[in-house]
Image (cartoon, helix red, strand yellow):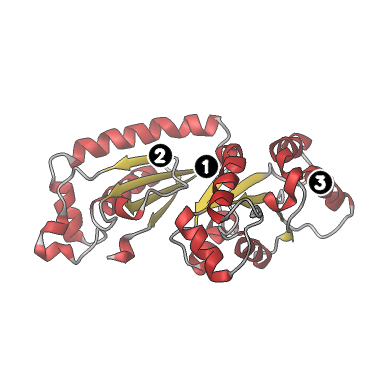
Amino acid sequence: MEKRLVVVTGMSGAGKSLAIRTFEDLGYFCIDNLPPDLLTHVVHLWHRSGARGEDLAIVVDVRTGQFFGDFLKAYDELVDAQISGYSKARILFLDASDTMLIRRFKETRRKHPLVTEGLGIIDSIEEERKILADIKEQADKIIDTSNLDPESLRRLIRQYFGPQAKNEGMVITIVSFGFKYGVPLDADLVFDVRFLANPYWVEKLSGLDGTHEEVKHYVLSDPMTEPLLERLCDLVEFSIPQYEKEGKAYLTIAVGCTGGKHRSVVVANEISRYLKLRDYNVMIEHRDCPKG
């Protein structure tokens, strides 16, 4: 069985240090802060050394300074090298909202790697986003850590990259969310279901969430829900093969309502059920449901 090769990158403060420790716990051999030009050389060296056959996780980010500009070229060379014993290298991109990144830097009192006398924390984050834009576009999996506690991030990495993760076919994640908490940064497709009847305004349903049968029945009883689900499921099923043709290993579909507790949960569960019945590799996540 081929070993996995993951290149971890993303925004400073988004959780790369925690991610690489999680990969270590999963049995990966991990390398932090590697200049991108050395990617292919290091993997070749590791393979030729006859060392233990661990999966590899390598962090490459803006801390490498001027060398980081060659990231995509170096990554393409790594993919083209097709190193024996390793599957295609995947890019894991960690992201978070600007507000959360600023808060984390203030709490930890750590310095952003791009901060200079003429460039403060806000400008540094903006500059880093520009540098990483093309890389994020090509990332195989994006994880938005804005609303994740450490254990939730570890859980997601274990799900996507742990030994129990399925290697066959694209992994599809259906995420319900509340627009008032922000659109997930890792979403590939975003659907807005706020026009459906809202259980929040029904006293006996307001305190429940979309996993309860009473709320599910209420949302599905809206005459607009069935035609909406038909169109959404058709669009999703049409889109999946197109993403697979592009070589995408992970697809995140976000379904949003106002608070992420009722309508989006029901619709996300219905899309998930539809895809699972067709043998797609599906995960479900209700991001904002616990917020009440």
Specify the farthest residue to the right.
49
User: Count of labels shown?
Assistant: 3
Quarter that holds the C terminus = bottom left
Residue sitting at 71 percent across and 48 percent down? 2
Residue 135 coordinates in the image, percent (x, y): 61, 40
- Residue 52 visible: yes
Dot 3, how many residues are within 10 Å of its Cα: few (below 14), some (14-19), or many (20+)?
few
Tag 2 secondary structure? strand
First along the sequence among labels 3 and 1: 3
Whole-number angstrom distance, CA of label 2 to CA of label 3: 34 Å
Identify residue type, mark 1: Met
Residue sitting at 34 percent across and 59 percent down? 288
Tag 1 secondary structure? loop
Disc 1 to disc 2: CB gap under 8 Å = no
Vertical comparison of 29 with 42: above or below = below
First along the sequence among labels 2 and 3: 3
- Residue 155 visible: no
Residue receiving disc 1 = 170
Residue receiving disc 2 = 189
Whole-number angstrom distance, CA of label 1 to CA of label 2: 15 Å
